[in-house]
Image: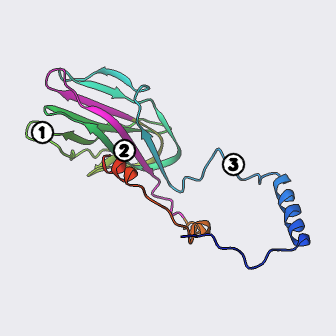
């Protein structure tokens, strides 16, 4: 089916010339001083994705056979007071994974809050959220770290353990940050997408269903 529609009439030469001159003038103008491409508007939320952990520091854990992956201190480039971590990992039987995060404020560093324990064998290694973590800096509400005051950076700590030499393999970690004091205004509709047709290929569907 042909989705392209021919316009009813074409503008005359004089009209087209005026449009070309106007476009050239707009391109020649400097950008507004209050707009910076390097500082996108986070709208009170930001997402960080990690699929490589080469910059994480590896060190032994407290229990025999444990390994710890410690992230560098990561700048959020915005104030935040809520944090959620998600992950994708291969956890063979007998292995477990623990996810922790802490906030780095201008005047203090919080403790590491436990955001979840994961295991393919919950009978041996519980798969659970950790209760009673509340202190003067914040609390964990099920899977969300909620701070009493905003922070500007964060740090992750992943604990990998298991029976013998077998440990889980972390493939992806995502961190969602939110500034609860921000109420973003609705974005305008993308009118360029109206009336367009997009195809979702089966290969892409299989790829996303396996993540």
The stretch of residues the image draws in magenta is 156-184
**Residue 154 placed where, x, y %?**
43, 38
Question: Is residue 179 in the magenta section?
Answer: yes
The disc at residue 48 is: none
Is label 2 in a helix, a strand or a loop? loop
Residue 192 seen anywhere in this rendered image of the structure: yes
Q: Which residue sits at x=36%, y=53%?
A: 205
According to the picture, the residue beneath numbered tag 3 turns out to be 36
Residue denoted by label 2: 137
Give the percent coordinates (x, y) of residue 58: 34, 22
Vertical side of 207 occupied by 74: above or below: above
**Quadrant in which residue 65 is drawn:** top left
Towards the viewer: 90 or 108: 90
Asked if the residues shown at circle 1 and circle 3 are in contact, with their CB atoms under 8 angstroms apart, the answer is no
Percent of width and height locating residue 8: 73, 79
Residue 11 lies left or right of residue 153; in this view the side is: right
Instruction: Single out the mark in the foreground, 1 or 3.
Output: 1
Disc 3 to disc 2, C-alpha distance: 33 Å
């Amino acid at each position: 089916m042909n989705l392209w529609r021919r316009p009813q009439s074409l503008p005359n030469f004089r009209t087209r010339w005026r449009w070309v001159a106007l476009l050239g003038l707009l391109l020649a103008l400097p950008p507004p001083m209050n707009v910076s491409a390097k500082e996108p508007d986070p709208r009170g939320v930001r997402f960080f994705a990690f699929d490589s952990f080469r910059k994480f520091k590896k060190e032994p854990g407290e229990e025999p056979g444990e390994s710890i992956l410690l992230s560098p201190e990561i700048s959020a480039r915005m104030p935040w007071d809520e944090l959620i971590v998600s992950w994708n990992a291969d956890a063979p039987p007998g292995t477990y994974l623990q996810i922790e995060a802490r906030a780095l404020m201008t005047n203090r560093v919080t403790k590491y809050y436990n955001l979840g324990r994961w295991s393919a064998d919950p009978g041996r290694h519980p798969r659970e959220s950790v209760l009673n973590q509340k202190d003067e800096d914040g609390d964990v509400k099920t899977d969300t770290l909620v701070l009493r005051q905003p922070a500007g950076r964060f740090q992750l700590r992943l604990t990998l353990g298991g029976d013998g030499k077998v440990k889980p393999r972390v493939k992806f970690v995502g961190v969602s940050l939110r500034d609860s004091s921000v109420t973003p205004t609705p974005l305008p509709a993308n009118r360029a997408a109206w009336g367009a047709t997009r195809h979702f290929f089966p290969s892409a569907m299989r790829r996303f269903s396996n993540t």
